[in-house]
Image (cartoon, coloured by chain):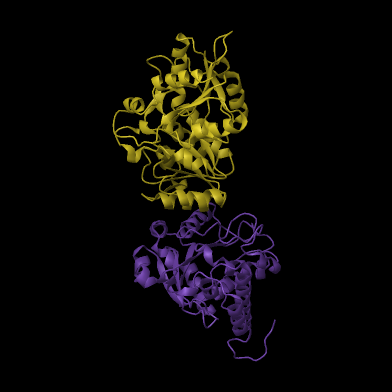
Amino acid sequence: MLNPELKLNEKLFDADVEQKPTRDGYGTGLLQAGEENRDVVALCADLTESTRTEAFAKKFPERYFEVGVAEQNMATIAAGLGVSGKVPFIASYATFSPGRNYEQIRTTIAYNNANVKIAGHHAGISVGPDGATHQATEDIAIMRAMPNMKVFVPCDAIEAKKATLAATKILGPVYLRFGREKSPVVTTEETPFRPGRADVYWQPPQGKKEDVAIIACGIMVHTALVAARELEKDKLYVTVINNHTVKPLDEEVILKAAGRAGAVVTAEEHQIAGGLGGAVAELLAKKMPIPMEFVGLKDAFGESGPPAQLLEKYGMGVKDVKEAVKRAAGRK
Amino acid sequence: MTPIHEGKLQYLEELANKIREKIIEMLLAAGSGHSAGPLGMADIFTVMYFHILHHKPKQPKWPDRDRLVLSNGHICPVLYATLAYAGYFPLEELMTLRKLNSRLQGHPHRGTLPGIETTSGPLGSGLSQAIGMALAAKLDSKKYRVYCLMSDGEQDEGNVWEAAMFAGKNKLSNLTAIMDRNNIQIDGYTENVMPLENIKAKYEAFNWHVLEIDGHNMSELVAAVSEAEAIYEKPTLIIAHTIPGKGVSFMERDYLWHGKPPNKEEAARALKELRTLGGRIKSEHE
């Protein structure tokens, strides 16, 4: 059952659940951050509409900088702003930023400890028809491996807004990951969001003990919740954790859930190598080695196609989460 | 900006010579590092920190200070030596260059060492960081100016031209770039590795005001920086023609000295040359 304390969207399992892309939350969050803090500035590399930077750019033209199709320049200009008292947000597609400008981010933002917020848009294969060149599937891995960097993967548009606002208040480099496609709204404005703190969104009914803990991030949180509800019909009970902060990882909540369940499944719209699953595996290998299964891209690039069908074809559908749970439970 | 009067000019030239000696001593102690670039830029660094920049070495984070961004971080021995002479940290610390637990990293790291404005080393990223600082100054209506010291070899990097376009578009008049035009890079002469000329015309086409100077003539640098301050609609590039390895005859103009330190015997010869002003004086100070 859904955790009643978290005030999640009561309609999240309905066929007509509200759907919104997480990038919308970046747009509203950035605008609000700009209203609250005059040091917030935004940069974009010729993608103001699709990264939802547009509203900020229109409201605060003097604080918006168009850099053209030049992601390396965007990152390094932001580094200069970030060490000069500003709170710059840079936005492009994640394949380009932090894809193309990885080294600039590493040297001039992360190692330089510049106060820059990197918004990676069009993450995951749910980007759809644009194809694999525009589907960022390694960005969590490269950003998570970078010292000084914090990594947030919000599960819906509302959480995306909260994460964007939270990033403003963190002093230092932050990576925020957003999707292009509409996805179900899982949370409400009242749902708590605490950076670095994972939340248990789904738990077994009273009197039942969980068989597996699912740890998910991004749009896979909703997929995991749907899988959890269906698994109950098969008498398999799970907890679902929304692990929006991939770095720093909430070790306490994850270890507690893993300890109770005795087996773990991670779910993310990213390569299995190096992403959320890797982060959880690193933790469990050290502190609590138990059976673990991974839902994500299996060392493959995506392709063009409708988002929902792509997620199924590449092993990130509800069915894949359910099968992973059964495999993990069977290994206990 | 006031011109350098004659008495100060002599003082600055002697100081630049001391900085060159320090560079040789540091590189010998480190056992690795770059020789030619730091020696070639000693005059410019001396004038920047002892005549041009508004800064407070005892208050390195003074918000109104002029910013000096070193883009080609590998010439950091000259930056470190100049900062130490300017009073940012003790001269003795210079000998820890590249050693374990040192604040003097092989390439500069903004963090614990006072006076370092940004982390650099990977080439081509300094100009855009200087742009970010110049934008911040304009947003905050601050009067400080931003100087980016960069190399000619790093003009090969695409990031530099992205930055050049942006600065031209945004008419960043509080930004002055100084290019060390010494014609060498690791693999050889710049015009063989990847021809840069006509570099002046290229920047002018990107809406920059471009000046050329003799990079070892301190008064020319001051005049050029003064002119840059008077240009309101454009960023300025000062192309400073320098001699790589300047002051040590066997290093001068030889690209093989770009990326290596002197050994003990070479360092002794270099120091003797520097301490006798190329053999023009007999007595040698310590």
Task: List x then y, in percent, for residue A34.
Answer: 50, 39
Q: In which quarter of the image is the N terminus of chain B?
A: bottom right
Q: Could you say which chain is coloured yellow in the image?
A: A
Query: What residue lies at 39% left-to-right and 63% top-to-bottom?
Result: B156
Per the rendering, the colour in which chain B appears is purple
Q: Is residue A318 left or right of residue B217?
A: left
The quadrant where residue B46 appears:
bottom right
| Front position in the image: B150 or B63 | B150
Query: What residue lies at 48% left-to-right and 14% top-to-bottom?
Result: A10
**Count of numbered circles on the image:** 0
Task: List x then y, in percent, for residue A77.
Answer: 47, 52
Task: List x then y, in percent, for residue B264.
Answer: 61, 76
| Front position in the image: A98 or B102 | B102
A244 up-or-down from B276: above or below: above
The quadrant where residue A99 appears:
top left
Query: What residue lies at 57% left-to-right and 32% top-to-bottom?
Result: A285
The quadrant where residue A310 appears:
top left
Task: List x then y, in percent, for residue A177.
Answer: 46, 36
A251 up-or-down from B132: above or below: above
| Front position in the image: B267 or B240 | B267
- Residue A195 visible? The answer is no
